[in-house]
Image (cartoon, helix red, strand yellow):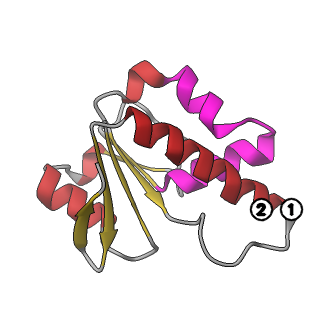
Amino acid sequence: MILIIGGAYQGKLTYAMEVLGISREQVCDCQREPVDFSKRCIWHMEQACLACVEKGVEPKDYFQAHRAQWQDSVLICRDIFGGVVPVDATCREWRQATARLCQYLAGEATQVSRIFCGLEQRLK
């Protein structure tokens, strides 16, 4: 599994498509649809985390339960776990749950990349 993180509009999906050979048909966009682990690429994972938090489910537990399905996938998550801490309790929990999930996934990944201005920084 490959984990790609980075800020909003930094070129994470473009990197996955151009460098890793992901086609648009192979992408599950969690902003528009529920997580479809049958797709090769899961994009906007932070939105899947928000859906879990709103349902009272720990995102890390949800992903662990589906571990076999994403082992060969490319997972893309926007970096929402830095900067100013949100005042809203739900937003704080979303941010923390997303960070916990990314820590878990980084440990499981064969490659972890941060994308900034379209450039890759290999972390693992």
**Residue 71, placed above or below residue 88:** above
User: Around disc 1, counting alpha carbons within 10 Å, would you say few (fewer than 14), some (14 to 19), or many (20 or more)?
Assistant: few
Q: Is residue 35 visible?
A: no
In this figure, which residue is indicated by the disc labeled 2?
A: 92
Residue depicted at x 70% and y 42%: 52
At numbered mark 1, what does the secondary structure look like: helix, strand or loop?
A: helix
Residue depicted at x 78% and y 48%: 54
User: Around disc 2, counting alpha carbons within 10 Å, would you say few (fewer than 14), some (14 to 19), or many (20 or more)?
Assistant: some
Percent coordinates x, y for residue 15 in the rendering? 22, 63
- Looking at the image, residue 63 sits to the left or right of residue 9; the answer is right
At numbered mark 2, what does the secondary structure look like: helix, strand or loop?
A: helix
Give residue 17's quadrant in the image.
bottom left
Measure the C-alpha gap from mark 1 to mark 2.
Answer: 5 Å
Residue depicted at x 54% and y 57%: 31
- Looking at the image, residue 26 sits to the left or right of residue 30; the answer is left
Identified by mark 1, the residue type is Ala
Give the label on residue 54, or none.
none
The magenta stretch is 44-66
Secondary structure mostly taken by the magenta-highlighted segment of the chain:
helix
User: Of 75 and 109, which appears nearest the observer?
Assistant: 109
In this figure, which residue is indicated by the disc labeled 1?
A: 89
Percent coordinates x, y for residue 34 in the rendering? 56, 42
| Magenta run includes residue 59 | yes
Task: Quadrant for the N terminus, please.
Answer: top left
Residue depicted at x 20% and y 51%: 23
Identified by mark 2, the residue type is Arg
| Contact, mark 1 vs mark 2 (Cβ under 8 Å) | yes
**Residue 7, placed above or below residue 105:** below
